[in-house]
Image (spheres, grey):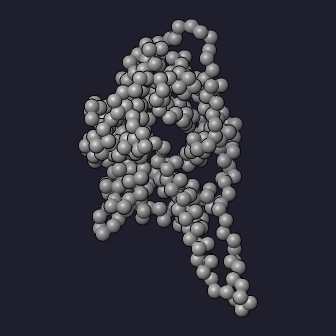
Amino acid sequence: MVPSPQMDEKAKPREEGLSGERPLDGCEGLVVRLYGEARAERWGLSSEQFSTVLARSLLKRMTGSGINAGQREEFLCTLHLEDLALAQACAMGQEAAWESFVRIYRPYLRSAAAAILRTSSTSAEACELADSLFAELYGLVDGKTGERSLFRYFHGRSSLKTWLRAVLAQRHIDAIRAARKFESLDEPDGDGKLHEPAQTVVTPLADPHRGRYVQLFQIALAATLERIEARDRERLRLYYVEEKTLAEIGKKVGEHESSVSRNLERIRRELKGCVEEILKKPAPGPSLSDEQIALCFEYAAEDVPIDLGKLLKQREPGPLPKGKQGA
């Protein structure tokens, strides 16, 4: 999707920094709204439990540098809230959340493992690598679920799929390093030379379909941006290209900065849905599966520069028509 930029800290006067002990003080209304947007209640998470997760993510953001109240709201509004709620519910052992997670993410993890190993997603190797992650995600220690769950390290700054694939790749690299360590302990043969391993273990090559997925994503994104209303285009241009703050954008388009934040989040959701819709269509090539579409987004977000200045180039000057407004 359109990548969320780092929060701008230069355009507004520096406000008093937030407390590291109570980072959510003074934004109770925002937390209530984010709790609703995350749909955390369906997993049995209370507002207080979700607030704890938001505070943990915010403290991670504050590590090494303080932020002010405006930057706090910008940061919290860019989190992948539904993913964050699902991960926390899974870490707490909520059965409904786990059932949903396994149903949605097991096929994706196996596809991701297949891409890492350059094999079929139904192969024993891909299934073993993908399924090995579930025990660590479940985090069962001394009968207590979540005590050491890997979900504790998910802060919502990327999508859950992107984070899971990164963890999966790291686990595979760790296994390769462990194998090499054991190989070095082999006994020498009769000539005093170490046994050569039967097969050299190498880090897997990149997904051979990566370039195609990125190209399809860029085409779909360009087509989507051509469809959006002028007012929404201007919001995106000011935020991503000119790197204006929410307050500055509000003055430019004539709305409160909280409305700017909600509208940007709405635009991102609509863009994502439209790009997915385009990628699912069979023309000009075969339609993509949900797992392949997820890889399109992931690869584009990881390391492919997207020239938003070109895609969102300013149109002829004139009054902006009244577009959709956030609630």
Closer to us: 90 or 292:
90
Which of the 4 quarters of the picture holds residue 226? top right
**305 vs 144: above or below:** above
Q: Which residue occupies 56% across, 58% down?
A: 169
Q: Say which quadrant the N terminus sits in.
A: top right
Which of the 4 quarters of the picture holds residue 219? top right
**Residue 154: x and y, percent?**
42, 50
Outermost residue on the top side: it is: 318
Q: Which residue occupies 63% across, 20% down?
A: 313
**286 vs 77: above or below:** below
| Side (left or right) of 5 relative to 285 | left
Closer to us: 266 or 154:
154
**187 vs 217: above or below:** below
| Side (left or right) of 109 relative to 33 | right
Closer to us: 32 or 5:
5
**Residue 243: x and y, percent?**
53, 25
Q: Say which quadrant the C terminus sits in.
A: top left
| Side (left or right) of 216 relative to 23 | right
**182 vs 205: above or below:** below
**Residue 68: x and y, percent?**
37, 31
Outermost residue on the bottom side: it is: 190
**Residue 37: x and y, percent?**
36, 35
Q: Which residue occupies 59% across, 74% down?
A: 181
Question: Can residue 32 be seen at all in this image of the molecule?
Answer: no
Task: Give the total of numbered labels.
Answer: 0
Closer to us: 77 or 121:
77
Question: Can residue 205 be seen at all in this image of the molecule?
Answer: yes
Q: Which residue occupies 67% across, 86% down?
A: 188
